[in-house]
Amino acid sequence: MSIESLKTEVARQFGTPAVVIDLDVVERNIARVQALCNAAGVANRPHIKTHKSPMIATMQREAGARGITCQKIGEAEVMAEAGHDDILISYNILGEEKLHRLGRLMSQAKVTVAADNPVVVAGLPQATAVAGHDLDVVVECDTGRKRAGVETVAEAIALAKDIASRPGLSFAGFMLYPPEDAMAETQAFLDAATAGVRELGLDPRIVSSGGTPNLRNLGKVRAVTEHRAGTSVFNDRMMLAAGMAGLEDCALTVFATVVSRAGPERGILDSGSKTLTSDTGGLEGHGLIIEHPHAKIARFAEEHGFLELSACNDRPQIGDVVRIVPNHVCVVVNMVDRLITVRGDQIIGELPVAARGRLT
Amino acid sequence: MSIESLKTEVARQFGTPAVVIDLDVVERNIARVQALCNAAGVANRPHIKTHKSPMIATMQREAGARGITCQKIGEAEVMAEAGHDDILISYNILGEEKLHRLGRLMSQAKVTVAADNPVVVAGLPQATAVAGHDLDVVVECDTGRKRAGVETVAEAIALAKDIASRPGLSFAGFMLYPPEDAMAETQAFLDAATAGVRELGLDPRIVSSGGTPNLRNLGKVRAVTEHRAGTSVFNDRMMLAAGMAGLEDCALTVFATVVSRAGPERGILDSGSKTLTSDTGGLEGHGLIIEHPHAKIARFAEEHGFLELSACNDRPQIGDVVRIVPNHVCVVVNMVDRLITVRGDQIIGELPVAARGRLT
């Protein structure tokens, strides 16, 4: 089949919009990230938030990943149920309901959690009481991104001490998501925090860094022992813009149909914010149309993508099926219950997004 | 129970983030819209995209709605399966797969579809061939919003003629979503289009207008026979901003927990773009926190809502559960498999979002 035939066949079998992944590209992406980690001597612990699929997590483990990262207990539950046995939950876990579930999860898999404040640390022993064994906790540190994490070395050391003092909790190390231009600052933070906790007799066995763009920084922060990258398994328009991927590395595309051409400079896709989402990733326009790279997906309704075609010589016609690289791939995967799988121009089947919509 | 106890109990039973609707408010909203339609002598055909629930659609029908509106065949299939028998699909339906499903749907329910171009019209007889009976088609017209729809009276008349000439298709009227300040232009468009189709011996039995904000314009365009409002069943921060609802009319709130306080002016909610979505609706900030109206949900990661608290005197603490009115409620409902139902401060149960994620 050609790509044109593939588009026709996907539309005929599944209708559009259809969210499609090319398993050949997925495998290449997984191998590339693993090779980068191996070369840097850093363990690979991919973040499953991008694919939400136990099967793709298994592909990552089989390629050499040490374990996986989940953001929510609900995601970890799906992964543990499928046999994944080494899970970092990179999130502050808080509240009776979640702590009880965390305790049960600890009976199924080796679980490490992150914390960035004493309120979260104070709650975690509730989970160890349910599990009946100890829990590894890493201190989340913020070295400039202004997201989650303690912002000072003193807080990091104090939180490590707090963790070590709690029944059933074990201080395991540090977790961060450093800004891409802050390797030196991150090294300095980690050096000071490590020295501080060693004075208390504690050992940061794990130092976890994160982010697909930071794959190019692997090895630059010496203390890092493992890395969490998510997006690299599929890539997206943000990664194209960041120079982290070429078009041939974008494993996921949304197949959409042109359903209207309101005027010579306008068109409408059957794919709006309910498929591509309104996450811009800081980019102009809402996705790259591979067949019409000069067309701009200017704005969305839920089921409509409104095209501006003024910069396009070759303009799409009503009924055309096009392929879109979304700005932010992780959130697109979360919109659908299944991904259509292909290899090149051959349809393979469907893959459930088993951990979709696990909010808690 | 008090609202504080309700928050504690929702967090304990379901965890946060939890998407909660108050059925008392839903019932009031449904009654209010029906009363507005009745007063204007316009039939009510609510758009189910907001709730995606056959049960709430039934509440709307029992309150007096003539039928329902769906955006996608997949939504209509769920509604028809639950017994809804009068459905307008307000969308260009294109492609073999969808036309076959449309034909099957026509055997289950009375279906009307919209079209804004001849390519779509040319395909629709495929559906009637499957169904074995005729299909009512309305011409979608654009009177200024620059979304879907023909933009000129001449195109509207030509498309009506095209529809009437096709085997199995019946021209049923016009559908529009007029800009709120374009009632006179809309009236003029409809008058001219109606005169034009009457000259062809055609009768626009249906003239469907749309939008919750246009509820205040009901009756101003004389030709309108029925109205499609979606958001009014729940309301949201956009409707607050538009003066279409007060806080007491917002039936849906997202219960979220404060999981971090990175600094005195910053905080983090366990609810990000995977729950509240990045649809801004043109507003500053990503939702109204009822307990802290001066807190700004400044930006999102998928599972993090980043708070700016500089304008807040009374600042949330880690572990606090807060209630958020989202900017755009329809897209929030689409993120979850179930809504938690309450009446006032009493938990009632759970309601499946049965038509969630129906992209096609």
Image (tube, coloured by chain):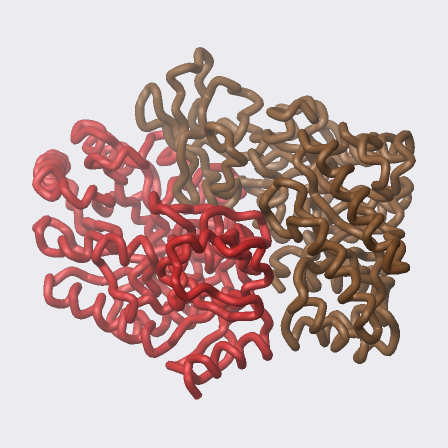
Chain colours: A brown, B red
Residue at the extreme top: A313
Q: Is residue A333 above or below residue B33?
A: above
Quarter holding the N terminus of chain A is top right
Direction from residue A181 to residue A280 in the image, left or right: left
Q: Quadrant of residue B47?
A: bottom left
Tally of numbered tags: 0
Q: Measured from the top left, where is residue A318 in percent x and y?
A: 42, 27
The residue under the point 33% across, 51% down is: B112
Q: Measured from the top left, where is residue B203 in percent x and y?
A: 15, 45
Query: Would residue A329 be seen by someone viewing this image from the given angle?
Result: yes
Direction from residue A178 to residue A171 in the image, left or right: right
Q: Nearer the viewer, residue A251 or A187?
A: A187
Residue at the extreme bottom: B1
Q: Measured from the top left, where is residue A339 in percent x and y?
A: 66, 45
The residue under the point 17% across, 27% down is: B154
Q: Nearer the viewer, residue B232 or A254?
A: B232
Direction from residue A318 to residue A247 in the image, left or right: right
Q: Quadrant of residue A243?
A: top right
Q: Measured from the top left, where is residue B88 in percent x and y?
A: 33, 54
Query: Would residue B50 be seen by someone viewing this image from the given angle?
Result: no
Quarter holding the C terminus of chain A is bottom right
Residue at the extreme front: A199
Q: Quadrant of residue B188?
A: top left
The residue under the point 88% across, 54% down is: A198
Q: Is residue B248 above or below residue A244?
A: below
Direction from residue B19 to residue A227 in the image, left or right: right
The residue under the point 58% across, 45% down is: A146
Q: Nearer the viewer, residue A98 or A204?
A: A204
